[in-house]
Image (spheres, grey):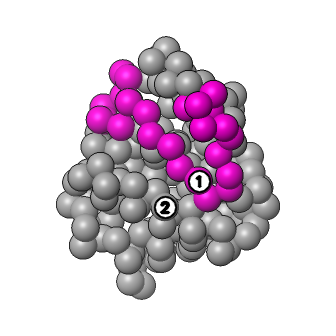
């Protein structure tokens, strides 16, 4: 089941919460800052340790940390494309979904990766994300698409009436 939530992702309860991250897992703005502020120091420390050990993530890459004070077990940090690159955004979402399956998550909450400060066209990004998670809906009890952006939520709701 795919559900749509017009709210702050840090208020969502899920096995996995997805963070729209940058390559260095520095949580300085947007969804990443909100998640880091709510999750606390453990998530920030684990993010720094991951980059020290593995180097920066490439576009479409994912990393996992604990969720700290969030209502989740894990945070999957995903680096989406800067600008509008449909194939890279699709690959990013696929990598997130596969990692969540490896973690045996039953519920996952995803933001509109790349559709904020990374500048991906919001309507197109919402479509790419929706169509990609659709392929994985049978592997999860619930896929929660979460955004505070009216345009993105409106597009997800429109798509939910089509598919």
Q: Earlier in the sequence, mark 1 or mark 2?
A: 1
Q: Tell me residue 74's x, y (percent).
A: 36, 37
Instruction: Give the residue furthest to the bottom.
Output: 162
Which residue range is magenta in the image?
50-74
Q: Nearer the viewer, residue 20 or 156?
A: 20
Residue at the disc numbered 2: 95
Residue 53, relative to residue 95: is it above or below? Answer: above
Q: CA distance from mark 1 to mark 2?
A: 7 Å
Q: Quadrant of residue 68?
A: top left
The residue tagged with tag 1: helix, strand or loop?
A: loop
Query: Residue 26 has which mark?
Result: none
Q: Residues within 10 Å of mark 1 (few under 14, many from 20)?
A: some
Residue at the disc numbered 1: 61
Which residue is depicted at the point 30% across and 70% down? 137
Q: Residues within 10 Å of mark 2 (few under 14, many from 20)?
A: some
Instruction: Give the residue furthest to the front.
Output: 53
Quadrant location of the N terminus in the rendered image: bottom left
């Amino acid at each position: 089941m795919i559900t749509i939530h017009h709210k702050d992702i840090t208020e969502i309860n899920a096995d996995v919460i997805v963070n729209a991250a940058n390559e260095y897992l520095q949580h300085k703005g947007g969804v990443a800052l909100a998640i880091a502020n709510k999750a606390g120091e453990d998530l920030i420390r684990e993010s720094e340790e991951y980059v020290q050990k593995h180097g920066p993530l490439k576009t479409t890459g994912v990393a996992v940390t604990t969720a700290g004070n969030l209502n989740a077990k894990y945070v999957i940090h995903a680096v989406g494309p800067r600008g509008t690159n449909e194939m890279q955004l699709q690959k990013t979402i696929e990598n997130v979904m596969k990692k969540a399956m490896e973690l045996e998550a039953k519920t996952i909450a995803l933001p509109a990766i790349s559709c904020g400060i990374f500048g991906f066209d919001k309507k197109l990004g919402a479509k790419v994300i929706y169509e990609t998670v659709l392929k994985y809906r049978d592997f999860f009890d619930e896929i929660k698409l979460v955004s505070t952006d009216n345009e993105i939520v409106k597009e997800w709701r429109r798509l939910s009436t089509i598919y």
